[in-house]
Image (tube, coloured by chain):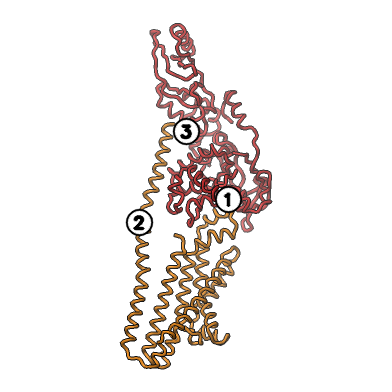
Amino acid sequence: MTIFSSSIDLFQATDTAGESSGFEPIKAGSSGRRVRRIGHFVFRPLMLILILGLLILYLHSTPLDSIDRRSLYWSTIRSELFQQLDLTLISSAVVTVLAVLLGILLTRRKAPIANSIVTALATLGQAAPPVGLMILAALVLGVGARTAIYALIVYSILPVLRNTVTGLSGLDKSILEAARGIGMRPIQILVGVELPLAVPVIMAGVRTAIILNVGTAALATFINGGGLGTMITTGIAVDRTPIIVAGSVLVAVFALAMDWVVMIAGELLSPS
Amino acid sequence: MALDLSPQEASNIGTELQPRRSVIELRDVSKHYKDAGAPIVDRLTLSISEGEFVALTGPSGCGKTTTLKMINRLIEPSSGQIIINGQDVGDLPSHRLRQGIGYVIQNVGLFPHMTIADNVAAVPRLLGWKKDRMTPRIDELLSMVGLEPSIYRDRYPRELSGGQAQRVGVARALAADPPILLMDEPFAAVDPITRTSLQDEFLRLQQSIRKTIVFVTHDMAEAMRLADRVVIFGPQSKIAQVGAPTEVLSAPADAFVASMLGSGRLMQLLSCVRLRDVSLDRWPTLAQGLEGDERLAALSSAKIEGKNRVLVLDEAKRPLYWIYSDATGESSKVEVDCKLELDATSLRDAITQIVYCSHDCAVVVDGDGAFQGIINIQGIRRSLAPLAGAGTSAANIGVDK
């Protein structure tokens, strides 16, 4: 018997030893990743501030007439910025709610056919060129910011929907079996296990949708929807390069800034 | 039992087999899927008593896992009845039923976004336990499965080895102290060394918690090692044999069961049979302190039985040493170097010990160290003789026919 019991001790020793040695690389890896991530977080805003600085420098070194100035008043820029923000945030929020709900429904059992139909429709929405989508929507619903938001929703629903479906259906089946096996109800499994585990994938989809919307929102000006695109169209109409440059740079900086915010939000929301 | 038992030992076993309350009852349970022709489980009837450890085993696709999952309604039976504690499982909402039954699966299925403590507390949380009741219970469970609470409580599942993860899986299943534990290949995904230690620890744990366990495994040796009773599923989802491991190993019902057990089954049988299950040989003994004539008389009567030594016992009947008589009538003391405990030693361990023992036989004592008899290779052969006829593999260990 002594042989046996001592060999058991030996087994336990190997078990724990195997565990502790398996530990180090994970820790080292995650701290290395964290350093890279922090660099990413800090680098982006610094870069954007630099670009804005260069833009201001450019505008100061260029002689501007009264038409230029009217478009470049801070109050004008600010209101266009807020319009752009409204278009982006409202459409993205609606898309997120809609697509996540739809994705949840599509991943419940007995929905594989609905899944393929809805995904096909959503793909259609994204495949259509956004300018066309905007103008088509305006023909049907009339011009204005509201119509622009509808167009943005149709345009950007696919990535969130697809990622929600992927995130929910790609979960480890044994986790779900265990959740069922210990007596969690379907809604508890969804809220307590499935959604938290799918958040990183869903957030990646939301991020893509926001990026699409923040860029596409610049087109809302074609249907009188406002936004930073107005500066560009104005600049083209009055043939003033400084206005066009300012508008384009601001659209790009705004898009990159939003992307940065969403990235950080995703980091904070996803499980550590 | 096909083993020859002394009356006293037979009566011991009798008390153990007193009819116990049946906790889980499967009555004529079948499961078939629409698209499949043959049923996966075919009119299965099985009764499992309180505190019993039952292993369901058989080749893959035989319906053992389906049977297990029908008990907690992860799979609904097509027909038949499953009764737990006198109540049809269909009468409860399925999540209520499952909250009252521990469930352990092969891939553990810990929730990766929760700490170990939160994983263990999953069921108590569903049952609405208060925090002040939950925290000490988590620590108790973690220590119970051999994980130091202060180290592991706040870790995440990805930081654990496979063996540790399954310990947490067992702790989670036991959290709300359910009377029944369902285990689906729980030790199959870890390496053989970890598996053996998990099995040993789990057996030890079961000694103290005495749950009713239904355990699915495709590994016959594991089933034999762990279970009180083994259910072997055969082809066409029929039960090929049900019985205690010793019964199955000594008398396989048919060629299928024999082939499932493989060629090493007598060695497995030796591991399953304990010394308390076999009849021991008597040996002349002598009370400590007796000298001269009484000693000579004992030695000479031993000689008539063909034995060249007597065993000296102290007042509590604990064996002390051998006394040999040599040709000149002088006697000499020799230490007892091989003592085996009645309840703890399997025949397999006994053989190993006897091989290294200087007297060709081992002294058997009970838990208090009192002398019970001796066992030697002949005695083990004699115990196995009734079994040897039952299988051709007797030749594997050279048992006389």
Q: In x, y percent, where is residue B393?
A: 50, 34
Secondary structure at badge 3 equals: helix
Q: Quote the CA–CA distance across marks 1 and 3.
A: 56 Å
Horizontal relation, residue B104 to residue A27: left or right: right
Query: Are circles 1 and 2 on residues that touch, CB within 8 Å?
Result: no
Q: Is residue B321 above or below residue A37?
A: above
Q: Nearer the viewer, mark 1 or mark 2?
A: 1
Packing grade of label 2 (10 A; few <14, some 14-19, many >=20) is few
Tell me, yes or no, if residue B170 can be seen here: no
Q: Quote the CA–CA distance across marks 2 and 3.
A: 53 Å
Tell me, yes or no, if residue A186 can be seen here: yes
Packing grade of label 3 (10 A; few <14, some 14-19, many >=20) is few
Q: Are marks 1 and 3 on the same chain?
A: yes
Residue type at mark 3 is Asn
Q: In x, y percent, where is residue B36?
A: 61, 56
Mark 3 lies on residue = B396
State which quadrant residue B13 falls in: top right
Query: Are circles 2 and 3 on residues that touch, CB within 8 Å?
Result: no
Q: Is residue A107 above or below residue B65?
A: below
Mark 1 or mark 3, earlier in chain: 1
In this view, the residue in front, B231 or A248, is A248
In this view, the residue in front, B4 or B345, is B345
In this view, the residue in front, B314 or A226, is A226
Q: Residue furthest left?
A: A61
Q: In x, y percent, where is residue B31?
A: 64, 52
Q: Quote the CA–CA distance across marks 1 and 2.
A: 38 Å
Mark 1 lies on residue = B129
